[in-house]
Structures are given as C-alpha cells and as structure tokens.
Amino acid sequence: MSLIKSERAIITSIWDKISLQVDAIGTETLERLFYSYPQTKTYFPHFDLHQGSQQLRAHGAKVLSAVGEAVKNIDNIPSALTKLSELHAYILRVDPVNFKLLSHCLLVTLAARFPADFTAEVHAAWDKFMSILSSILTEKYR
C-alpha cells in the first residue's frame, strides 16, 4: 500500500497544524487509548497514567514526534521507522494490535481537534497513512 500524491499533500497539510500542538495532541491520544483500551496500560507499569501527567505528556510528544518523522520522510517511511520498529518488536515486545488501537485514537483526536479540517477525504488519507505506519511497525514481528 502506498500513498498517492493527493494523499501526501493532505497528510502534510494537516501535519502542519498538528505540529503546533504535538504535546497536547500526543497526550490526548494516549489518554484516549488508555481510557478506551485499558489493556494497553500493561506496557507502562512504571508510568503515572493520570490525566495530564508529565510522563504521559512526554510519551505523547514522543509518539507524535515519530509520526512527524514519518511525515517528514513520507517517501521512505520504512527507513524512518526502522529503529522504532526494532525497539517495539525485539525489546519492548508490544502487541502489534496496539498500533492499530493507537492509530484509531489519534484519528479520533484529530477529528475532535480539527472538525472543520477533518473531512472524509482527510480522514481516509490519515487512516491509510496510519495503517502504513502500523504495518511498518509490525513487520519485524514476522
């Protein structure tokens, strides 16, 4: 699966808005993930997972920075995410389903934060982009 030119333009355009709020959007996405899918908390036993905690904000920013790195390298996402893929597969051993759950939570967060911008076309492009990211992050599991 690959992105077409119009999808790439949509992703980078929305990323320009996201990049101004990386901390807040990342935190909200993780809060939504942990609230909606409490089983995902098992990977963070050492974190303070209370709403707005410093650790949640820091990790949310880290997650969104990785998405930003993928956007910046949209023509070669696999190489941009190689180290992250290896970390999650070989060291952290994160259940691959969690990437899809996180993707869904990010899409919901974007729709809530940018309702006027998050059209069906934008949703479809970002859903496809996040599916590509999830697939790349899980390919080391095979």
Image: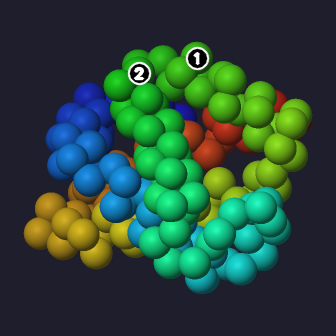
Whether residue 124 is situated above or below residue 85 in the rendered picture: below
Circle 1: is it few (<14), some (14-19), or many (20+) Cα within 10 Å? few
- Does the CB distance between marks 1 and 2 fall below 8 Å? yes
Q: Any mark on residue 73, and which?
A: 2
Query: What is the three-letter code of the residue carrying label 2?
Result: Asn
Quadrant in the picture for the C terminus: top right
Q: Is residue 130 visible?
A: no
Q: Is residue 58 visible?
A: yes
- Quarter holding residue 9: top left
State left or right for residue 27 relative to residue 90.
left
Q: Identify which residue, 49 or 92, lies in the foreground.
A: 49
Disc number at residue 79? 1
Q: Quadrant of residue 122?
A: bottom left
Nearest the eye: 40 or 119: 40
> Residue 105's x, y, as percent?
49, 68
Number of marks in the rendered image: 2
Sequence order check: which comes first, mark 1 or mark 2? 2
Residue sitting at 71 percent across and 32 percent down? 85
Residue 101 x %, y %: 62, 65
The correct choice, above or below, for 70 with respect to 29 in the image is above
Q: Secondary structure at mark 1?
A: helix
Instruction: Give the amino acid type for the residue marked by disc 1 in the picture.
Output: Ser
Q: Residue at x 52, y 69 (%)?
A: 53
Residue 39 at what x, y percent from top left?
Answer: 78, 75
Residue name at image x 68 percent, y 23 percent = 83
**Residue 64 vertical position relative to residue 109 in the rendered view, above or below:** above
Distance from the alpha carbon under mark 1 to that under mark 2: 8 Å
Q: Is residue 23 left or right of residue 30?
A: left
Q: Nearer the viewer, residue 13 or 125?
A: 13
Q: Secondary structure at mark 2?
A: loop
Give x and y (percent) for residue 126.
Answer: 37, 51
- Return the residue found at the far left: 116
